[in-house]
């Protein structure tokens, strides 16, 4: 979803850092749709980055800029240990190695933007987490992302690529259908009621978390692509700005936009597995480093709901 929106933004802009976007290679497990209105060359590939030779084949085209979003989400990575490590770790290592080996053949040093996650942090946690806090993931997904950050820093240090990792907040409101992310309910309890559909809430209203919209996530990626990474030093990954809010505050924003009837579509159904997982997640961050480098996000849940209504519902709530 974020990748699709990123491609749309790239096509609309037509340039990155003043250089025209002349070619797009889009790779996903299901063949992506070619973007409308793009005058350059587009290649769409249905593939698995962790399969032998796939990353090398993609890198052989020597793209100047690579956005690495390929991953399976938290709940699925926790449920399927082998798949999580194959996709989230082995796929990342395959890509980094493909870049390194292509550079051995002839000089090549692309910019690589890696999407990490706040899941690299887990209890024990301070009330507000800074960028210098140690990685203490409590899920396989968070562990895989933490390893990816270390690899990105080392391959950048060695000069094989110019890497930047952005730790994304939980992205809400995600359009489309629910996925296997353990955090999916944060979107479901807004998206479904806004469309007149019942949604399940598996945790208490007091649960607090760190959020940003899909619109903000695309902005993070584009800004990272244009950022001079010399400002990062050896610390190549940074936590993106976001909004610390409770489930109850989400629901109040829904009430302001769609009224009491929408709120009544939220059905509380506690799920002990999700409650346990969410209980170890971070709740609030000091993102001053990212903010000082120009990254921006929403500052209220009303802004997040408004972005969804504008981007996904044409600016109009269903009757």
Image (spheres, rainbow, N blue to C red):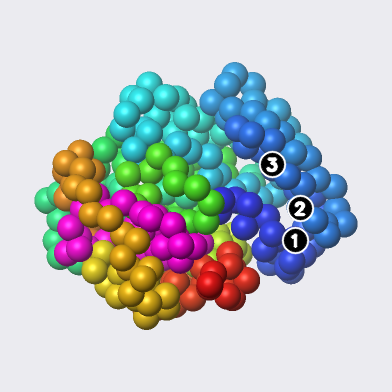
Quadrant of the image occupied by residue 25: top right
- Picture residue at 58% right of the left edge, 67% below the top: 313
Q: Are marks 2 and 1 in contact (CB under 8 Å)?
A: yes
Q: CA distance from mark 2 to mark 1?
A: 7 Å
Q: Earlier in the sequence, mark 2 or mark 1?
A: 1
37 with respect to 277 (left or right): right
Q: Position of residue 231 (x, y in %)?
A: 47, 65
Please state which of the two labelled residues, at mark 2 or mark 1, is closer to the viewer.
2
Q: Are marks 1 and 3 in contact (CB under 8 Å)?
A: no
245 with respect to 293 (left or right): left
- Picture residue at 33% right of the left edge, 74% below the top: 260
Q: Secondary structure at mark 2?
A: loop
Q: Using the rendered image of the protein, determine whether residue 122 is visible from the camera's viewpoint.
A: no
Q: Position of residue 177 (x, y in %)?
A: 50, 47
Q: Which residue position holds label 2?
A: 35
Q: Position of residue 46 (x, y in %)?
A: 68, 31
Q: Is residue 203 magenta?
A: yes
Residue at the farthest bottom position:
256
315 with respect to 42 (left or right): left
Q: Earlier in the sequence, mark 1 or mark 3?
A: 1
Q: Are marks 3 and 2 in contact (CB under 8 Å)?
A: no
Quadrant of the image occupied by residue 44: top right
**Mark 2: few, some, or many residues within 10 Å (few <14, many ≥20)?**
some
Question: Magenta segment range?
Answer: 186-214
Q: Which residue position holds label 3?
A: 32
Q: Secondary structure at mark 1?
A: helix
58 with respect to 245 (left or right): right
Residue 11's disc is: 1
């Amino acid at each position: 979803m974020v990748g699709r929106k990123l491609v749309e933004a790239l096509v609309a802009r037509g340039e990155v850092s003043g250089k025209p976007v002349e070619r797009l290679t889009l790779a996903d497990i299901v063949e992506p749709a070619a973007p409308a209105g793009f005058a350059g060359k587009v290649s769409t590939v249905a593939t698995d980055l962790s399969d032998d030779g796939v990353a090398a084949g993609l890198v052989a085209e020597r793209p100047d800029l690579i956005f690495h979003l390929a991953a399976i989400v938290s709940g699925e990575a926790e449920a399927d240990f082998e798949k999580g490590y194959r996709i989230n770790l082995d796929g990342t290592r395959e890509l980094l190695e493909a870049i390194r080996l292509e550079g051995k053949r002839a000089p090549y040093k692309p910019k690589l933007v890696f999407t990490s996650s706040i899941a690299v942090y887990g209890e024990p946690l301070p009330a507000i987490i800074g960028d210098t806090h140690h990685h203490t993931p409590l899920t396989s997904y968070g562990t895989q992302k933490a390893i990816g950050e270390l690899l990105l820093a080392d391959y950048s240090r060695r000069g094989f690529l110019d890497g930047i990792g952005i730790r994304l907040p939980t992205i809400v409101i995600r359009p489309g259908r629910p996925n296997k992310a353990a955090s999916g309910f944060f979107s479901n309890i807004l998206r479904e009621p806004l469309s007149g559909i019942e949604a399940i809430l598996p945790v208490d209203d007091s649960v607090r978390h760190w959020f940003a919209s899909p619109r903000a996530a695309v902005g993070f990626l584009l800004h990272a692509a244009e950022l001079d990474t010399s400002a990062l030093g050896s610390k190549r990954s940074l936590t993106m700005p976001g909004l610390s809010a409770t489930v109850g505050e989400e629901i109040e924003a829904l009430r302001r936009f769609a009224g009491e009837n929408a709120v009544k579509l939220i059905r509380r159904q506690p799920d002990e597995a999700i409650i346990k997982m969410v209980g170890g997640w971070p709740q609030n961050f000091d993102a001053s480093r990212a903010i000082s480098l120009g990254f921006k996000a929403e500052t209220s849940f009303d802004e997040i709901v408004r972005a969804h209504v504008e981007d996904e519902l044409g600016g109009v709530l269903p009757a």
